[in-house]
Amino acid sequence: MIAGIGSGLLIHTRMSNASAENFANGISLVTEIFLRLIKMIIAPLVFSTLVAGIAKLGDIRAVGRIGAKTLIWFICMSLISLLLGMVLMNSWKLGQGLNLPIPNNSEKVPVDAGGISFRNFTEHVVPDSIIGAMASNQILQIVVFSVFFGIALAAIGEKGKRLVHVLETIADTVLKMTGYVMKLAPLAAFAAIAGILALKGPEVLLTYGTFIVGYYAGVLLLWILLLLVSALFIGNKSWQIIRCVKDTILLAFSTSSSEAAFPSLLAELESFGCPNRIVSFLLPLGYSFNLVGSMLYMTFAALFIAQAYGMHMGLSSQISLLLVLMFTSKGIAGVPRAAIVVMAGTLNMFHIPQQGLLLLLGIDQVLDMARSATNVVGNSLAAVVITKMEKAFNN
């Protein structure tokens, strides 16, 4: 990121506008290759992880009372996170100052050009061909098919276990591929930042700084909302659990990985009084369905990119975007930079240039620290709330 800033500013100040534009166009090849590699893994990653995750739950009816309460809580917290991000980004308009031209290889259709009606949204949701959906990276259609497939696979019982094992192997393989691709992230970040600074100059740095501060302010507000809502059910325990898991939150923050904190979080929740039967069920589910920090980030990022390219999004389009993000963020816990992979598939549905993701790639590490810690906070509160509802505290 620092090298990209220095190179971009040097070219902006020492070269003519035409030369700077040629440099930006040339170096964009690096970012385009990285983006293609990301798009390449979207379909197999979402399908294999989501199907395996659902199938391992067993018969959906057997999930029972605890599962129903848990999923309802996760959905409510997800909506709070997404709506907060939408309200803040519409109020602050953090990406509006960039005024970037839409890339030549991107759709030049404004998001609201034809209006996203309920019929259009439904057509985007329900696939007419899973092969076609995967070929065009229609991620929500892949999710719908994966959910049906996972439920059916769980329903056939023992006969489906071999296929579940195969899908888990595929998921592990694609995750390893994702790790390889993400090794190119620093180079892509350098190219993206150098190119934009060569064209726009140092004023872009102010936009980046404002976005980081704005996102961290949003995270703070989200923590407050989560604590207040949880306090309605568990009272002072909402503050006590944060003190109990503070070391795990710091671990997630410092490593930029909520998954790295999983073992210690499990132990700390049990020491707080949550029974193992609830925690061992809820946490794996939460790491797929309750990534409130990641969802806040994705809302910030999607609207930031749309604002940066001057693309107007009406209320109906933004609500549709939130619904898509709510579903497409499920089932990929443990993926390095999971939010980037999800965003790459989601932006395409709304004709928002995927190249905009590279604008945030250079500062993604800073943002990932906050969203990882927030994911741990969300899952900790969920575990205590469900335990309280079940009247199952051990102490």
Image (cartoon, rainbow, N blue to C red):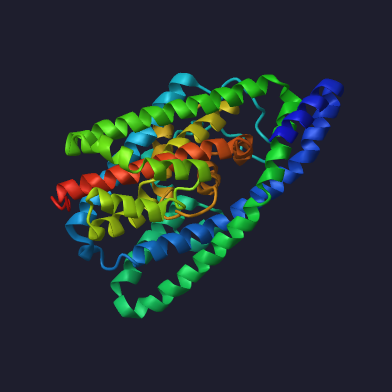
Residue nearest the viewer, comparing 374 with 312: 374
Where residue 13 appears, as percent x and y from the top left, is: 82, 21
Residue 197 drawn at (x, y percent): 72, 27
Residue sitting at x 45%, y 23%:
90
Q: Is residue 322 left or right of residue 189?
A: left
Which residue is located at x 36 percent, y 41 percent? 377
Res 104 visible: no
Quarter assignment of residue 116? top left
Q: Is residue 105 left or right of residue 395?
A: right
Q: Nearer the viewer, residue 124 or 280?
A: 280
Above or below, comparing residue 347 to residue 100 in the picture: below
User: Which residue is located at x 72 percent, y 44 percent?
Assistant: 187
Q: Is residue 145 visible?
A: yes
Instruction: Give the quadrant of residue 175.
Output: bottom right
Count of labels shown? 0
Q: Residue furthest bottom?
A: 159
Query: Image height check: is 88 above or below 184?
Result: above
Quadrant holding the N terminus: top right
Position of residue 179 relative to residue 165, above or below, is above
Query: In the rendering, at what x and y percent does residue 391 appear?
Result: 13, 50
- The image position of residue 339, as x and y in percent, is 50, 45
Judge from the rendering whether residue 368 lies leftward or rightward of residue 195; answer left or right. Answer: left
* Residue at the far left in the pictured view: 391
